Image: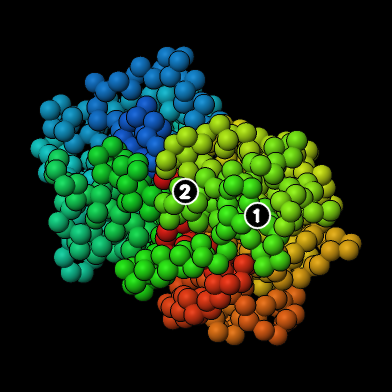
Amino acid sequence: MNYSVMNRPIMNCFIIKRLMKRCYLFPSLLFGPALFLFGCLHPIQTGGEYAPEPDLPAPEILWGLGDVESAAVKQRLFTDAGMEIISHWFNGPEEWQWGYEKSGPQAVIRGHYDKGRAIQIVVWLHDWEKKHPGYLTGKFVREDAARLARIWSGMGYRSDRLFFVLFSEVETYYKLPSLSREKVLAAYKAARAAIKAEAPDARVGLGFGGYSWLGPGEPDLSPYEEILRFHSDIVCVQHMHDYRNYGLMCEQVPKSIARLGRYNLPVMVSHFKFWQDGHAENPGARVTGRFVQEYLTGERLRRLYADGLRYWIFMAEVAEEQILPGTPEYRQLVWSLRTHQPYPSGMAPDETAAGLLLAEAWADYKKYQITAEGAGGFLRVGKANGETVSEGIGYGMIMAVCFDDREIFDGLWQYAKAHHNKKGLMDWKIGPDNRPTADGKNSATDADEDMAFALIAADLKWGGYREDAERLVESIWRYQIEDGTYIVKGGDHWGGAEVTNPSYFAPAYYKIFQEYTGNPGWSRVVDAGYEMIARLNEKTGAGRTGLLPDWTRANGTPAPGFRFDYTYDACRVPLRLAMDAMWFGDRRALAQLAKVNSFFERIGASKIKAGYTLDGRVVHDWSDVCFTGPAGAAALFSSDQDYRREIWEQTVAMDDPGAYYQSSLRLLSLLLISGKLANPLD
C-alpha cells in the first residue's frame, strides 16, 4: 500500500493505489445490498460533496490501535480485525523515543512498512509544556520534530505511510501561561515544515479535541482556516468519554467529522475510547461494542465516509481491558471492523421456540434418517433404497456435534472409517450389502470435508478426535486438492480445474483446517475458489444473480458433459459461503451472498423454485427446501427484515422428515441461521 498524497481534492492516493493492486475489490463494494469485491476501480470521493447512494463504493476505512508501537501489534485485536495503523505517542523528550534511533528498533520500523502497515505519531505536549514552559515553541520546533520524522520514517526508508497528529487536543494548550493560540499555530506550521523536510510524504494534521463539538451549534473554526486550507494533509480529532456518556459520543462523532470534512481533507479519529476507570463489570466493552455496531457499520458508516472519515484509531485500553478475545463483543467487533457491516443476528424470531423446533427436527432426523440396520454394528444415514452416501454421514456428524449427541457422532464416524479406501477417504456410496456399489468406489470431496470439519468441532468440544481429524484433513489435502491450481477436485481420483463443483468449495472449513493443522496452503485453496467465482461472475449471469452452477471449469466456462445450472448440487453454495461470511467475515463471500439476496428477495421466499439458469430463468417449476433453506442462510446478511422473517418461516414450514436430502439441508440451514452452527474455533 502506498500512503502518499497526490493532492488535497483527490486525497486518498494510497487507497487508490491499494485498490489498483487489488482490483477485484471494486465496484461490487456494495453495502447492505452489496459489499466489497470484484470489479474495477471506482473514483475515491472526498469530504461532504456527495450523498451516499447505492451505486457508490462502500467505505474503505483503515483501523488502528495505540498507544505504544511495541504493544499495539502484540494485541490479537490488531491482527484479527485487519488493522493497519500502529499508533505511538510522544509526550515529551523524556520519552523512550530516542532509543528508536538504534539499528534494532529501526529494523522493526522498516519491517512494519514492509508488511504494509502505517505508523501514526500522536504528539501530546500539554503536560510537558506545563512543567517546561517554552519547549513546544522552542526545542520541539527547532530539533525534536525533525528528529521524530527521521526516526519514524525509518531514517528516510518510507514516509508515505507515516502520520503525525500535532498537539492533540490543541484547544487545551491555549490556557497554559507560556502559550497562546497564535503561538501554538505558528509552532504547528514550523513543526510541520520540519517534519516535511525529513519525511516529505508524511501526513501531518492539527489534533482537535472532541469536546469542541459540545452543545448547540458548531465551533468557530475561523482561526484555523489558514492551517486547514494550506498547512494540513489530514485533519484529526480525538473522541474519549466516560462510558456513561454514550449519547454524547454518538452526538459528537458525526458532528465533528461532518464539520472537519468540509475542508476536503481526509478525517482521522486519532484516538477513541470509552473510559471505565477499572470498573469490575467492564461496561466499556458493552458501550464500545454497541458504538461500533451502530456507528461504524452500515449506512451510518457510509455517511461518515461521505463526510470524509478515512482513519480510525482505537486506544490501547479497548484491546487490553475491554474487548477481550473469546467474548461475544470481541467476535462481533472483529467481524464488523473487517466487513464494515453490522454483525448478523440470528433469524429465529423466538430463541426458545427455535430451540424446541430444532430439537424436534433432530429427533425426526434420527428417527427417519439414522439407522443401525445394515451398518455393520455402527450407524449410518440411510436412503430409502438401502444405500448410504458419504455426504449423509458428513451431514449427520455435523448435526450430532451441534446437538451434543456424541453417541450418534461416534456411530456415524466409525461407519465412515469402516468404509475408508486406501487413501483414508470414505467410498462415496455403499450398497445394502454394506459394500461399495459398482459406481460408488472412491471418494466425494464434499462429504470428506464435512466429516473433517465435524471431527475438528468434536475434538474442540469433547476432545479425543485430533488424530483422526488431522489424518483426514491431510488426506483431503493430498488427494482432493489439485496440485498447482489448488482447485477442489470432485474426489480422490478425478476433477480439478477442468471440472469442479462449486458446492464442494468450503472456504470456512479451509480456514479452520489451516488454523487447526498449521498448513498455510489452505489459504491458497480459499483464494483459488474465490477466483473461480470471480471468473463465473465475469462470464455468466452469476455476476447479477450470484447463482453458481452445479459443475464448471475453474476458468468460468461449462465443463463438457456436466450441468451448468443452479440445481441440486449448487443449491448448497449459499450455505457454504454463509459459513465463511458468518464465521470469518470474508468480503468475497459477502459480496456473492449480496447478489444471491438481491435475486431471491425480488422473487420472495415462498416463490423460490427448485433450480435456475445462472441468469435467473426457472429450471424446475416447483419449490424445494433444498433451495429455500440455503437461500435463508444467505439472508443472514440481508437488511430486509420482512424477507428475513418470511424465509425463516418458509424454511420451517417445508418439513418433510422422511426425505433424506431435503431434511438434511433444511436442518443444516436452520442450525446456521439460528446461530446454533458456529465456528468451533470461537
Which residue is denoted by mark 2 in the rendering?
407
Mark 1 neighbour density, 10 Å: few (under 14) some (14–19) many (20 or more):
some
Callout 2, which amino acid?
Glu
- Position of 554 with respect to 24 (left or right) is right
Residue 479, placed above or below residue 285:
above
Residue 540, placed above or below residue 681:
below
Cα separation, mark 2 vs mark 1, equals 18 Å
Give the residue drawn at x 74%, y 53%. Answer: 433
**Residue sitting farthest toward the right:** 560
Q: Which of 242 and 52 is in front in this view?
A: 242
Give the residue drawn at x 52%, y 76%. Answer: 655
Which residue is denoted by mark 1 in the rendering?
374
Callout 1, which amino acid?
Gly
Q: Which of 640 and 53 is in front in this view?
A: 640
Image location of residue 602, percent across then percent down: 58, 82
- Position of 406 with respect to 133 (left or right) is right
Give the residue drawn at x 75%, y 49%. Answer: 435
Are the residues tagged 2 and 1 within 8 Å (C-beta)?
no
- Position of 649 with respect to 214 (left or right) is right
Tag 1's secondary structure? loop
Tag 2's secondary structure? helix
The quarter of the picture where residue 299 lies is bottom left
Q: Quadrant of the N terminus?
A: top right
Q: Nearer the viewer, residue 285 or 466?
A: 466
Q: Which of 282 and 10 is in front in this view?
A: 282
Mark 2 neighbour density, 10 Å: few (under 14) some (14–19) many (20 or more):
few
The quarter of the picture where residue 483 lies is top right
Q: Quadrant of the C terminus?
A: top left
First along the sequence among labels 2 and 1:
1
Residue 635 visible in the snapshot = yes
The quarter of the picture where residue 576 lies is bottom right
Image location of residue 604, percent across then percent down: 55, 83
